[in-house]
């Protein structure tokens, strides 16, 4: 029996009877069950979202079906809950599986079936489980970040349901939302922070926090330590000594170059006053990475130091650091000679270099006569201003010539090598004119003038340089300098100028030295630079002529020099005009009768001729004809006015001898002579001897004037005595000159002057003197 289109009504018990021809019939009973599949399944959610671990939050109900369907929960192809309940209105199955994170990715399937023939009825349900983020990760757009170049930092949070809320923190401070861009997709949240890296960002921590407000305990964080590359920033510090006032000459100095750089510097250099310092053990300069060590520093180590650090981002120099090496005073001037006359005041300036500059000065004096140094302690004798002390020194006698010694002391110590000033006798006056002036390097706008300074007159001299237009006399250049040479840069082209150079000192000025110069034209200036014309024949001839002249002049000078050296030792022969001899050290006034101008056996004085003109100065070494002491004494300034008549008469009176400003006496010579002659003839002979016409025959200086015994016999020998006196006088002076000019290592003679003996005022007629300068 085939039942078409089966329905519920076809469900009966059917009887099938089989009849046989030769046997009994047989009956079979068959029960037909008609199964009705469930119509649908329904998902009924009681709670959503659910917390992890929640159960029975959803029920699946199968509607219809006969017999009642079996309802089960399947997840990921595996049955997780087969328990169902049949009720009048259907079959129910409440999900008893605890909620978990995987429910977000593996949905549940409710399956209802009451047979094995038809496919079960199913429904899918995704459980809405609230859960926090699974991971949080921060990534920078580049590593390292570069100072000043904009960069992005991305924070990604995954696994949060609902999507996580991301918050940025920089060193514990909340970052403003203006620099944040957030995107969400499924369970992934991406937050991008725009950042302009700076030096101060390096090493800071950037925190990204992802949280689910429903699950405060499920918050996740990620921290990024910023790596910012930037140029070095150097700072130079003193490592030793700890206190700057302890840095003195001879101590050690350590400098540290502290560098803030990323990446670290690959090179650090140290500089002193702009000059790089390199490692040099012999120079006591030690450079080790970021440390500079200077051993046994000197005052030259003072100055400004800085260091330069370099990395891949660039170079950077530190601010300069002033280093001050304190040192004891040292003389800031060369050894000087101070010329001063007796009774005059000379201001001697002592200048030192010291740090610190609050110094105290001490002056002492010494010479051969005063071996013990005399200390000047009274404030009125010297003044002090900073690093300079001025001593007002006045020599009272020749014993006051020697060495002035100046010491200075500061907190570091006392000056080790003092400033020394040699005080010598000198007569000061105006300076001499400059010599050997010439013009050089003349262009259209510039020129140079070079001169040799003359004698300074015993004082410090300066030079006045002036340039005037030759056409109008207009002053174009005016300069006072300590140098005799100068250059000028502001001349006009094609102009003729007059140049004057004048020497100045405290006693006056010299006559000007004049010379002329002609500046080049502009065209000549430009033409003369690249061209080098060939020498013309006339130039060759001129050159040969000049050479011959120079050779002849040189030969003449050599002959003159040889003769001069053979005759005398000349220091200088100046003719600066008459000089009044009013100084005590020249006239000899106020001197005692023992030393005069003789110090240690050497006579030092200034030489004048009979007219009072300055002739230089000389040092005379005493020789055997002179005793160990010498006397500087003045002579009469007027010629003798008395004239004795000779008994034989007829001879004209002799002219007066040249007057001597001073004389060096051979003392004791007359004391051993015979008694003076008497009578007129003797007087005349004596007077003639006093006028330089006496003979020196025998041992008495008046013998040649007549050998009379005071009875008139001496007068008759006047003529013969005079002639004989002249001959013997020459021989006598030759002996003196030979002795004075003898080659002795300790003697220095520059010129020999013969001063005729004259009668001293107030002396007896027999007292005559014989003098040599």
Image (spheres, helix red, strand yellow):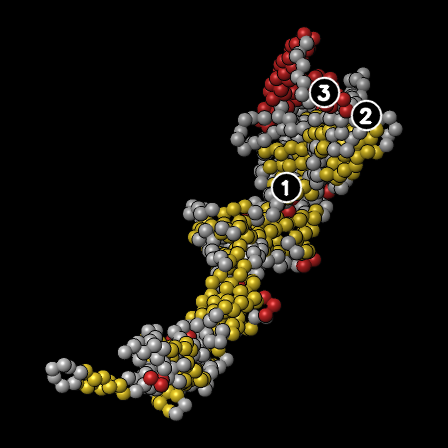
Q: Depth check: give the residue in front, 156 or 28.
A: 28
Residue 397's spot in the image, x, y percent?
67, 46
Mark 2 near mark 1, Cβ–Cβ under 8 Å?
Answer: no
- Nearer to us of marks 2 and 1 is 2
* Residue that label 3 marks: 527
Element marked by disc 2: loop
Query: Which of the two discs, 3 and 2, sits closer to the camera?
Result: 3
Q: Is residue 214 among what the camera can see? A: yes
Quadrant placement of the N terminus: bottom left
In terms of depth relative to the viewer, which is nearer, 750 or 601? 750
Residue found 56% across the figure and 58% down from its top: 150
Residue position marked by numbered label 1 in the rendering: 337
Looking at the image, which residue is at 19% across and 86% down? 27
Residue farthest to the right, as pictured: 472
292 vs 695, nearest the viewer: 292
Crowding at mark 3 (Cα within 10 Å: few <14, some 14-19, many 20+): few
Which disc, if any, is residue 204? none
């Amino acid at each position: 029996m085939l039942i078409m289109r089966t329905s519920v009504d076809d469900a009966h018990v059917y009887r099938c009877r089989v009849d046989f021809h030769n046997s009994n019939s047989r009956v079979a009973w068959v029960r037909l069950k008609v199964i009705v599949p469930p119509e649908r399944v329904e998902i009924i959610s009681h709670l959503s979202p659910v917390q992890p671990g929640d159960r029975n939050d959803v029920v699946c109900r199968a509607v219809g079906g006969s017999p009642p369907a079996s309802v089960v929960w399947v997840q990921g192809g595996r049955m997780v809950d087969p328990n169902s309940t049949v009720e009048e209105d259907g079959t129910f199955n409440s999900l008893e599986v605890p909620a978990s994170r995987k429910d977000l990715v593996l949905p549940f399937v409710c399956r209802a079936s009451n047979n094995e023939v038809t496919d079960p009825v199913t429904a899918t349900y995704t459980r809405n489980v609230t859960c926090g983020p699974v991971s949080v990760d921060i990534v920078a757009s580049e590593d390292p970040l570069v100072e000043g170049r904009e960069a992005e930092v991305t924070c990604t949070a995954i696994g949060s349901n609902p999507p996580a809320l991301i918050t940025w923190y920089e060193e514990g401070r909340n970052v403003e939302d203006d620099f944040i861009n957030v995107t969400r997709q499924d369970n992934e949240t991406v937050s991008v922070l725009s950042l302009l890296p700076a030096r101060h960002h390096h090493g800071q921590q950037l925190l990204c926090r992802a949280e689910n407000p429903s699950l405060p305990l499920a918050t996740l964080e990620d921290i990024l330590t910023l790596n910012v590359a930037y140029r070095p920033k150097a700072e130079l510090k003193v490592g030793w000594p700890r206190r700057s006032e302890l840095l003195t000459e001879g101590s050690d100095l350590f400098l540290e170059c502290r560098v803030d750089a990323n990446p670290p510097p690959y090179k650090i250099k140290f500089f002193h006053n702009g000059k790089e310092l390199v490692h040099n053990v012999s120079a006591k300069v030690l450079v080790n990475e970021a440390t500079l060590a200077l051993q046994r520093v000197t005052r030259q180590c003072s100055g400004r130091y800085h260091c330069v650090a370099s990395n891949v981002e660039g170079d950077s120099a530190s601010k300069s650091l002033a280093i001050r090496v304190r040192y004891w005073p040292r003389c800031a001037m060369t050894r000087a000679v101070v010329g001063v006359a007796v009774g005059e005041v000379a201001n001697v300036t002592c200048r030192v270099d010291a740090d610190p500059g609050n110094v105290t000065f001490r002056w002492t004096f010494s010479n051969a006569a005063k071996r013990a140094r005399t200390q000047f302690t009274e404030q009125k004798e010297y003044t002090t201003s900073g690093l300079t002390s001025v001593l007002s020194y006045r020599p009272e006698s020749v014993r006051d010539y020697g060495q002035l010694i100046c010491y200075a002391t500061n907190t570091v110590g006392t000056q080790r090598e003092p400033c020394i000033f040699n005080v010598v006798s000198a007569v000061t006056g105006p300076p001499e004119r400059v010599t050997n002036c010439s013009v050089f390097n003349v262009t259209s706008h510039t020129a140079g003038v070079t001169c040799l300074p003359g004698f300074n007159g015993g004082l410090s001299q300066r030079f006045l340089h002036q340039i005037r237009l030759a056409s109008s006399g207009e002053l174009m250049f005016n300069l006072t300098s300590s140098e005799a040479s100068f250059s000028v840069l502001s001349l006009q082209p094609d102009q003729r100028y007059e140049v004057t150079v004048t020497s100045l000192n405290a006693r006056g000025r010299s006559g000007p030295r004049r010379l002329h110069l002609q500046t080049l034209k502009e065209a000549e200036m430009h033409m003369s630079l690249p061209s080098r014309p060939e020498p013309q024949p006339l130039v060759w001839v001129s050159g040969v002529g000049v050479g011959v002249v120079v050779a002849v002049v040189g030969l003449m000078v050599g002959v003159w020099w040889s003769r001069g050296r053979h005759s005398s030792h000349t220091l200088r022969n100046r003719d600066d005009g008459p000089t009044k001899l009013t100084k005590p050290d020249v006239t000899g006034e106020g001197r005692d009768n023992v030393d005069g101008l003789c110090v240690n056996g050497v006579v030092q004085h200034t030489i004048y001729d009979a007219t009072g003109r300055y002739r230089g100065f000389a040092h005379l070494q005493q020789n055997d004809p002179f005793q160990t002491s010498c006397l500087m004494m003045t002579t009469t300034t007027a010629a003798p006015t008395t004239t004795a008549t000779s008994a034989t008469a007829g001879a004209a009176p002799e002219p007066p001898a040249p007057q001597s400003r001073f004389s060096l006496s051979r003392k004791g010579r007359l004391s051993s002579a015979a008694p003076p002659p008497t009578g007129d003839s003797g007087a005349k002979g004596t007077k003639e001897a006093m006028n330089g016409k006496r003979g020196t025959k025998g041992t008495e200086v008046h013998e040649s004037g007549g050998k009379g015994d005071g009875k008139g016999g001496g007068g008759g020998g006047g003529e013969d005595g005079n002639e004989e006196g002249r001959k013997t006088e020459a021989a006598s002076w030759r002996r003196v000159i030979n002795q004075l000019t003898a080659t002795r290592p300790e003697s220095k003679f520059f010129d020999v002057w013969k001063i005729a003996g004259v009668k001293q005022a107030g002396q007896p007629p027999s007292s005559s003197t014989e003098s040599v300068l």
